[in-house]
Structures are given as structure tokens and as C-alpha cells.
Image: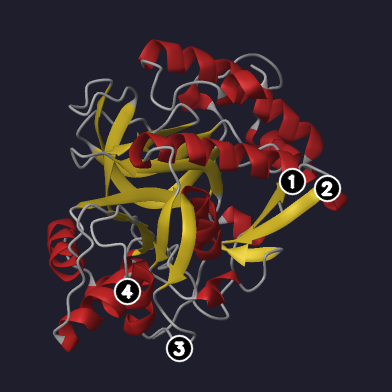
């Protein structure tokens, strides 16, 4: 399928049979493309005895463990074609993944993100309150998943305010100036879970302050990961956000730097949804067999978007449960799932980036 036709699909428009047929064709084509363009990937496939040619059932596509992107530079285009290099997050000094994006892959990812986000946010640009600091955007040529998330969601934003200063302190006066005259107006808020919790929600609570952002929408991601000791449940997080900010619509999303399949957004029913451009397979850790609905296992993430590196089938370090397919109460077709934690011995890191403190 050509790019225009692929990106012209509705984000949640294909049922199981239709999506499986699409993925059988497209995953085989991506595997051939990356086998030809990336020497390291080709050698891995040869070592695994993966044959060339033919269609691939989604569960049979050769998957790469996410940690491999830290060990190897996996790139399927000439280096002069690399448009930007995205880095995964990690503790300061730790090895990070390097994801090489050419202009084609970057544009496809952005268009897919827009189509996904549009179905939740709408097509009108909203005043954009970023619950982070501008320092997350320092190097545009080589930036982190955190910076990429801010830039990605900025396509839905108009006038923008950063809620945290350079020292990661809440700039309450600056936020209030931004909100002046916008009472009752719908805003888009975006940030990473831990930073929202510590630097916005807790900061407001400690000051005895509250903002009234009723009618607005907050989208957050990145989880707690290395900060799991301070994690709270999703219900408590949403409740405290609503009390501190007055925001009723609080939606999580699942995504990673190593997988440019767009993002898996949380619907009003509380389920994460794979779009037509991405998919998930839950696998048993002992033999990597496919789990049944309701059975916990390691998440494999599939994508039809990456052209510049072999990221179309990635075994993550996250554990999740497939909740169903094509029958979510929200009406979206496709698989819906939840993330329950990290796989045993998984490196403790997340999209909340290299932030310390």
C-alpha cells in the first residue's frame, strides 16, 4: 500500500480480519526493505534463519529486543539521509538507544500522530500548556523521547506556555498570566507522568493552590519507570490532577522512542488502543508464544511506519494484558490493552527522560 493510502486510513477503522491482511503484506515488505538496507539487521536475520520473501503473519515477523537499539546502530538509509536522531531516555551516563529517522519516516510518524490525536482532541488548535521546561528541547537534531513528545503534540497547540522554569520549578505566575482571559476556554495540557505529579500536582498541593482548567484535556505518558517508588495508581493520579488543575479529561498514552508506530492512546473507557498503523502482541516470557486475551505477558509492538530503521517489530521490556479486540465500549476497532509493569530484570528507564531530582 502506498503512503497516501496507508495514512488515509481511519485510525481505528479496520477490524481484525482487515488489519491482519494489511499487516501480512506490509510487514513482509518492511522486512525485505530493512534486510536490504541495514547490514546488521540482515546478519541478524541470517543468524536466525529467517527466509527471504513471502508474506508474514504478524506474530511471525522477526522481532528485535528493544535493548538491541542500545547495542547497535540500526539504520537502513545512507547516513546523509538521516534527518534527526532520536534518543531513548535513561539515567545520566547510561547507554541509550539511537533511532535514525529520515525525512520520510519522520513525516509519516507526524501524520499518524496527528490522525490519532485528532480523534481525541479535535482538529482545532488549542492553547497549549506544556507541563515541562523548555530545556527538554535543547538539541533538535538529536533529542530525547521527552522533547519529541512535546514537539509532536505541539501540532495540536496554538499559543504555548511552559509551566516549569529552567530549574524545573513551577512558574505559577507565568501560568496564571497565560491563563488570564482564558477562563472556561478549552486548553491542551501535555507532559510526562512523573514530572506532572512531582512538579505540578504536588507543588500546587504544597502551596495550597489550585488552578481552574475545567473543560480542558490533559494527555500524559512516559510512566514512572525508574521512579516507581513514588508511583501512585492511575485512579489516584487522575483524581489528584483533577483536584489540583480542575481538568476532567485525563488521558494516558503508551509509546517509546524505539518504535515509531505512533502512540497507543487511552480511550474514555480507560483502555489503550492500537491504531491501524501500530499493533501489539502479548507474548509469554518463557517461550514467546502468543498470550490469550486476559493473559499477562511481554508486549511486542508492531508498526507500519519506520522506513529508515528496522523498528517494525520490537519486543519491549513492558508487561501488559490484551483486554479485547474490536469490541471496546468506546467504539474504536482494533486491539485494546493495558500496561501492568516492567518485565523482570528490565532496565529501569522510561520516556520521562534523563531528568534527575
Of helix, strand and loop, which one carries label 2? helix
Q: Nearer the viewer, mark 2 or mark 4?
A: 2
Estimate how packed mark 4 is, as few (under 14), some (14 to 19) or many (20 or more) residues with alpha carbons within 10 Å. some
Of helix, strand and loop, which one carries label 3? loop
Label 3, label 1: how far apart the Cα atoms are: 33 Å
| Image mark for residue 227 | 4
From the image, tell me which residue sits under label 1.
102
- The answer to whether the residues at label 2 and label 1 have Cβ atoms under 8 Å apart is yes
Relative image position of residue 313 (x, y in whole percent):
54, 37
From the image, tell me which residue sits under label 2.
81
Label 2, label 4: how far apart the Cα atoms are: 37 Å
Label 1, label 4: how far apart the Cα atoms are: 33 Å
- The answer to whether the residues at label 3 and label 4 have Cβ atoms under 8 Å apart is no
- Lateral position of residue 121 relative to residue 77, left or right: left
Q: Nearer the viewer, mark 3 or mark 4?
A: 3
| Image mark for residue 167 | 3
Amino acid at each position: 500500500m502506498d503512503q497516501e493510502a496507508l495514512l488515509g486510513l481511519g485510525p481505528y477503522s479496520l477490524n481484525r480480519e482487515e488489519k491482519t491482511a494489511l499487516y501480512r503484506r506490509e510487514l513482509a515488505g518492511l522486512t525485505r526493505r530493512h534486510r536490504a538496507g541495514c547490514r546488521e539487521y540482515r546478519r541478524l536475520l541470517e543468524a536466525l534463519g529467517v527466509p527471504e520473501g513471502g508474506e508474514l503473519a504478524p506474530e511471525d515477523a522477526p522481532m528485535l529486543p528493544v535493548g538491541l537499539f542500545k547495542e547497535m546502530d540500526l539504520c537502513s538509509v545512507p547516513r546523509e539521509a538521516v534527518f534527526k536522531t532520536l534518543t531513548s531516555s535513561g539515567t545520566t551516563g547510561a547507554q541509550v538507544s539511537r533511532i535514525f529517522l529520515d525525512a520520510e519516516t519522520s513525516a509519516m510518524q507526524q501524520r499518524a500522530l496527528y490522525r490519532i490525536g485528532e480523534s481525541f482532541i479535535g482538529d482545532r488548535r488549542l492553547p497549549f500548556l506544556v507541563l515541562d521546561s523548555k530545556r527538554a528541547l535543547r538539541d533538535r537534531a538529536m533529542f530525547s523521547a521527552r522533547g519529541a513528545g512535546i514537539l509532536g503534540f505541539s501540532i495540536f497547540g496554538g499559543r504555548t506556555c511552559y509551566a516549569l522554569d529552567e530549574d524545573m520549578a513551577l512558574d505559577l505566575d507565568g501560568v496564571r498570566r497565560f491563563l488570564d482571559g482564558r477562563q472556561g476556554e478549552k486548553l491542551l495540557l501535555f507532559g510526562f507522568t512523573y514530572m506532572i505529579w512531582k512538579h505540578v500536582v504536588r507543588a500546587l498541593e504544597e502551596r495550597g493552590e489550585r488552578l481552574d482548567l475545567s473543560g480542558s484535556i490533559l494527555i500524559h505518558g512516559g510512566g514512572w519507570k525508574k521512579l516507581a517508588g513514588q508511583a501512585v495508581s492511575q485512579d489516584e493520579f487522575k483524581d489528584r490532577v483533577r483536584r489540583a488543575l480542575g481538568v476532567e479529561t485525563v488521558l494516558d498514552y503508551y509509546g517509546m522512542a524505539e518504535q515509531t508506530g505512533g502512540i497507543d492512546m487511552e480511550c474514555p473507557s480507560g483502555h489503550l488502543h492500537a491504531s491501524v498503523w501500530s499493533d501489539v502482541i502479548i507474548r509469554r516470557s518463557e517461550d514467546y508464544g502468543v498470550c490469550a486475551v486476559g493473559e499477562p505477558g511481554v508486549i511486542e509492538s508492531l508498526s507500519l511506519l519506520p522506513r529508515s530503521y528496522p523498528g517494525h517489530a520490537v519486543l519491549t521490556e513492558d508487561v501488559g494484558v490484551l483486554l479485547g479486540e474490536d469490541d471496546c465500549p468506546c467504539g474504536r476497532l482494533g486491539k485494546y490493552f493495558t500496561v501492568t509493569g516492567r518485565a523482570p530484570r528490565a532496565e529501569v528507564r522510561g520516556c520521562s527522560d534523563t531528568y534527575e531530582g
